Amino acid sequence: MIQDEPKGEVVAAGGAVREKKPNFFLRIVIFIRQVFAELRKVVTPTRKELVKFTGVVLGFVIVMMAVVYGLDVVFVWLTTVVFGVPGA
């Protein structure tokens, strides 16, 4: 494993000889450092973006609900035609 000096991240080198694993506690420390490095990359959306994304998700859910409802109606009609109405 090679340590990337600018950010302190640990990455595997392509042609490097496999080194001995660090001990358990050192691996936990490396993991926590990598988690914080990834969290620094997170970008919080603006209010306008958040409202737009929420609208897109709700619109998609409504469309999918309509598709499932339509398929349900078609399958109920199809089973009624194929098997008939009991007692009629």
Image (cartoon, rainbow, N blue to C red):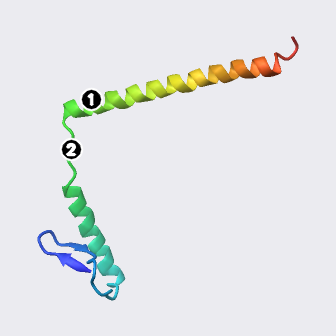
Name the residue tied to disc 2.
44
How far apart in space, not on screen, are marks 2 and 1 (Cα)? 14 Å
Compare marks 2 and 1 and give the one earlier in the sequence.
2
Q: Is residue 1 above or below residue 49?
A: below
Task: Give the residue type that dot 2 points to.
Answer: Thr
Seen from this angle, which residue lies furthest top?
88
Left/right of residue 76 with respect to residue 60 in the rendered view: right
Left/right of residue 32 with respect to residue 57 in the rendered view: left
Q: Residue at x 33, y 88 (%)?
A: 20
Q: Residue at x 23, y 57 (%)?
A: 39
- Residue 52: mark in rendering: 1
For label 1, the SS is helix
- Residue count near mark 1 (Cα–Cα under 10 Å), binned few <14, some 14–19, many ≥20: few
Q: Residue at x 25, y 34 (%)?
A: 50
Residue closer to the observer: 42 or 14: 14
Quarter of the rendering occupied by the C terminus: top right
Task: Give the image location of residue 85, x and y in percent.
Answer: 82, 15
For label 2, the SS is loop
- Residue 62: mark in rendering: none
